[in-house]
Image (cartoon, grey):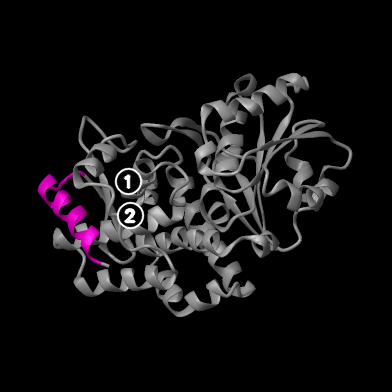
Amino acid sequence: MTTLTVALGPRSYPIHIGTGLLGRRELLAPHLAGSQVMVVSNETVAPLYLDRLAPALEGCAWDKVVLPDGEQYKTLEVLNRIFDALLARRFARDATLIALGGGVVGDMAGFAAACYQRGVPFVQIPTTLLAQVDSSVGGKTGVNHPLGKNMIGAFYQPRCVIIDTVTLDTLDDRQLRAGIAEVIKYGLLRDAPFFNWLEGNMDALLARDRTALAHAIERSCRNKAEIVAADELERGQRALLNLGHTFGHAIETGLGYGTWLHGEAVAAGMCMAAEMSRRLGWLGEEERRRILALVRRAGLPTRPPGTISVARFLELMAVDKKVRAGRLRLVLLRRIGEAVLTADFDETVLRESIEASGREG
């Protein structure tokens, strides 16, 4: 087992990464506020891993709420099922929520924890690669709105993150590839040596080589933990973690939540950001081609769906958390390993980049 720390002073918390961690009570017990525990999971994950988690909950008065599986259920309406369960079973302020599942479960359980009785502790136990390398770390919680993804939520840090890589054994190939998109992101935005490593080890990741996956998860979590510790509330460098996300969120919202997986949309979004960076004269053509080649090798889309027009893209991108004073800010690339948040671009370049990305692979 490897343990990293998200350094947030008295709210610092560990990220445990290893195999066979689900049932280890000694990892979980220090982070439970009291004896009441509500496990939030979904219809896919609960049958697979709830029983494996049970030994870690020995001695607790625990219950579960099982949500439908899919991004299309990341709504206020479904979120209310968690509150219904907590209230119906009289969970008190010293209760702890545990998120057992992927990014949707983690975001919703975390948001419920932030709101229930004005805040109760929660623990992240992510079971997908995307959640393990990204969404479980950093305290971003929330739900989607028909007009924009993740526009309703809160910053609310977990007490602990427990990553049992055994859960990846049951992850389907499409979900695995979606998680690799977020792994590639870290190499692009701040870790060029990691990007180089990914170029040499992509086949091993796709083949689920345990050593390669463990390295990718640890390196990604280390990058995320450092950024969150420096800028918890996204007032500066944490916004760089949104590389590809403004374009990607527009794809998800435009197609309808759940049509493309989040990682698939982010992959295309990163390629769109690379195209725009090239047009601004920042990113060289050779580097752009390297990015597209790695994304393609991961089995991920390198261009957006043709059903979303340029005008619709711009409309959807205008509903973004990085908009300031009516001005859209984008995360773009100076080079592989160096991202920048900027509003200093002509909208004509943005339009041309969206159009070109739809034509080029």
Identify the image quadrant of residue 124.
Answer: top right
Identify the image quadrant of residue 78.
Answer: top right
User: Which label belongs to residue 269?
Assistant: 2
Prevailing secondary structure of the magenta residues: helix
Identify the image quadrant of residue 4.
Answer: bottom right
Res 333 visible:
no
Where in the figure is residue 141, as x and y percent of width and height?
A: 52, 36
Q: Is residue 162 above or below residue 232?
A: below
Kindly identify which residue carries mark 1. 246
Q: Which residues are magenta?
A: 343-360
- Which of the marked residues, 1 or 2, is nearer the chain's N terminus? 1
Out of 216 and 82, give the one closest to the viewer.
82
Residue 106 in magenta stretch:
no
Out of 271 and 27, give the one closest to the viewer.
271
Secondary structure beneath label 1: helix
State the residue at coordinates (48%, 75%): 202
Mark 1 residue type: Thr
Where in the figure is residue 203, as x and y percent of width and height?
A: 50, 78
Sort mark 2 into few (<14), some (14-19) or many (20+) by Cα contacts within 10 Å: many
State the residue at coordinates (74%, 53%): 48
For the N terminus, give its image quadrant: bottom right
User: Which label belongs to residue 56?
Assistant: none
Mark 2 residue type: Gly
For the C terminus, give its image quadrant: bottom left
Relative to residue 110, is residue 169 drawn left or right? right
Residue 351 in magenta stretch:
yes
